Image (cartoon, grey):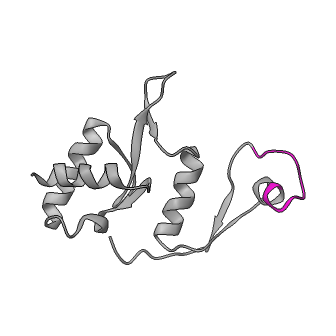
Amino acid sequence: MTTKDRIQFRLQRSRRYVFIRSDFDDIAGYDQIGRALRELVKEGQLLKVGYGVYTKARQNVVTGKLMPASPGGSAAVMIEVLDRLKIDYLLVGATSAYNSGESTQIPASLEIKTSPRFKRDYQ
């Protein structure tokens, strides 16, 4: 079983939609994992969200382009990324008002506020 096959198997079995490179450290070495992840991105099975951060992908039925496979869309992916990277954040604006019950208007876009500086010290 190749490194790519082992990573694909783990992706299929996982309920998560966001993965960081270190999730696959027990499978192979750093370079091998990087090559396998690049191949999966090229094949359209993953989307690269950021440095060392990936999400499952699927093809949009209407446009035919790749999009996050998460049922919550890209907003849910961003929230999951922040949670996985342990970055403190707040939902602000219309999103905060809707979630707290202050407003019944559904926000058109997600507004997230993070600390002015956050450092990512791992992969």
Residue at the front extreme of this rendering: 13
- At a point 69% along the width and 55% down the height, the residue shown is 111
Image position of 37 with respect to 28: above or below: above
User: In the figure, residue 116 lies in which quadrant?
Assistant: bottom right
Q: Main secondary structure of the magenta part?
A: loop
**In the image: residue 63, left or right of residue 91:** left
Q: Is residue 110 left or right of residue 98?
A: left
**Residue 104 included in the magenta stretch of the image:** yes
Quadrant in which residue 59 is drawn:
top left
Q: Is residue 13 above or below residue 63?
A: below
Identify the residue at horizontal 59%, vertical 74% (top origin): 88
- Magenta residues, start to end: 98-107
Q: Residue furthest top?
A: 62
| Residue at left offset 47%, top offset 28% | 60
Q: Is residue 32 above or below residue 104?
A: below
Q: Is residue 85 left or right of residue 5?
A: right
Seen as rendered, the residue at the extreme left is: 1
The percent position of residue 37, horizontal first and vertical second, equals 24, 51
Quarter of the picture holding the C terminus: bottom left
Residue at image x 83%, y 62%?
100
Q: Which of the two residues, 27 or 35, is positioned nearer the viewer here?
A: 27
The x and y percentages for residue 103 are 89, 53
Q: Quadrant of residue 22?
A: bottom left
Residue 99 percent location from the top left of the image: 78, 58
Q: Where 114 falls versus 66 (above or below)?
A: below
